[in-house]
Image (tube, rainbow, N blue to C red):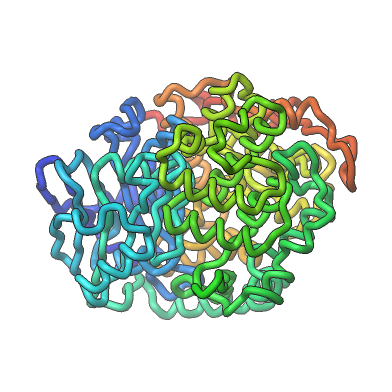
Amino acid sequence: MKTSYNGKLARINLSTGEIKVEQLDMELATKFIGGRGLGTKMLYDEGVATVDPLSENNKLIYITGPMTGTASPSAGRYMVVTKSPLTGMIASSNSGGVWGARLKYAGWDALIVEGKASEWTYINIVDDKIELLSAKDYVGMMSEEADEKLKEAHPGCNVLNIGPAGEHLSLLAAIMNDKDRAAGRSGVGAVMGSKNLKAITVTATAKVVEPFDAAKLKEATKACNQKIRENGVTGGGLPTYGTAVLVNIINNTGSFPTKNWQESYYPEADDISGETLKDTYLVKNAACHRCPIACGRVIKVGDKVVGGPEYEPLWAYGGNCGLHDLNAIDEANMWCNEYGLDAISTPCTIAAAMELFDKGYIKEEECDGIPLAWGSSEAIVEWTKRMGEGKLPLAKLMADGSYRLCEHYGHPEISMSVKKQEMPAYDARGIQGIGITYATSNRGGCHVRGYLISPEVLGLPEQLDRTTTEGKAQWCKIFQDLTAVIDSMGLCLFSSFALGAPDYAALLNAGTGTEYTPEELLTVGERIYNIERLFNKAAGMKPEDDRLPKRLTEEPISSGPSKGQISQINVTLPQYYEVRGWENAFPTKETLERLGLTE
């Protein structure tokens, strides 16, 4: 039977050099789809939840979805699933670009990488041939240079690699692919570095994935593309201004965290907005594989043409560090990509360090000539590079994230993180629903596990009152479940501004031959969210890990459109557990039975 699954994966043991081809478990694939869902289930079943994340017993699963590489809109995504060294819980980091589609075209649904190489190694894939090669010539290289050199060695390949941050095991290390695309969060690059794995190159002869029903997929894709073109966000705002279109929108709600979340309105926000970026440094748009949105930015930094910043680093290096120097933000973002650092957690850690410095906890003599002062262009650029290099004592501490940094100085409350991962650019005091997403995200502080900004701010699929708690728990569950489906299919979350569960069901059914109703598909998403929670429970998660920093629950916003607001997570969290069928942060026996997870 034709299906958009390849039906096989490779298990690569770096310790022994053994490479085995295994058949994809199609029963599990039906229950968990692929990508994030199937990867988490596989990792859970292999007993990884209890291991040291940086030991050779941890595993890395690079996994596509059934729609990756198909004609579906935004079908270029893949996931890196592992145990996070940053949070100690599940890590499932999503990336776009082209690499994931090339892995699919080469004939593989997933790679399971285990063990640890005795010396620096990279994996070279050419269709069904996989080999382990020495990476000694590429160690120490910046991500872009490694990408270019590996392409010289293997013409026509696509490259995934880690930069120096991953090599020295920074807990903020990302995995880069196609130069400026990143599986950015949760320290997945450190896991790759802990295995002495520098890169994975993929060369594929095929250019297509054959779906179950090509005619139906063509019809569904045409309908979805039309919705994407006609939607104001996916057809207008994102192509024109990129994700940075949100800078002014969020700031005007008074929910733009400023100076490490001490304030929530930034008067100079327009200086770092998508509109200003377009008028100054933008060279052109960029699109991931088969994406009709093309929200990526290509910009000039000095005499270099590089991938530009998304909304999150524009905020995090900008308002969150008290800075409106767009040129410095562009440069700092470039160094995140070059060193292979998470472009959310890195600037958020710098912001936390700036507050520690401002309050006298970090002393000037520790700063080695570059004070961590609010609004310092030099500080954001140079401390990003120092974190990437990981040599100076303070920089090495910062490279493990704001929680460990602030804990070291006796003030963990200054870390704006959940489960030790830094929160992104939306103040949960001014936008109530997103606070539930942050608190309950299985991978720590995260907005793309249930993007309630869509209804609470953008009015999609309908406008909600961002200041109230009514109904937000149910909305959060629905968005989390649908996002789990999208991530598992191999599609981009941004498509959901225009598409809904019926559209995703039509695409998946045409690709794989399943017959999901929209309701059944959301149940699969719920199953995925619950298996992640079971992984976290096995990894040692406690109910109190579902929390927000005290600043959001005890310190009202001081000024701006959301003045006086605090997060009502104490009200919404019990409501959320009720709609999830959880008690004390974990699924009940009845919920597990209903979702078929009791085995």
Q: Nearer the viewer, residue 267 or 188?
A: 267
Q: Is residue 567 left or right of residue 28?
A: right
Image point 26% across, 58% down: which residue? 200
Residue 532 in view of the camera: no
Horizontal and vertical percent position of residue 398: 51, 36
Q: Nearer the viewer, residue 456 or 421?
A: 421
Quarter holding residue 573: top right
Image height of 444 relative to 65, above or below = above
Image point 65% across, 49% down: which residue? 316
Image height of 4 relative to 399, above or below = below
Horizontal and vertical percent position of residue 382: 54, 50
Image point 76% across, 28% down: which residue? 553
Q: Nearer the viewer, residue 107 or 303?
A: 303
Horizontal and vertical percent position of residue 305: 50, 74
Residue 43 in view of the camera: yes
Q: Is residue 268 left or right of residue 101?
A: right
Q: Is residue 4 left or right of residue 403?
A: left
Q: Is residue 376 left or right of residue 214?
A: right
Horizontal and vertical percent position of residue 502: 58, 62
Image height of 16 relative to 298, above or below = above
Which image quarter is the N terminus in? bottom left
Image point 34% across, 41% down: which residue? 168
Which image quarter is the C terminus in? top left
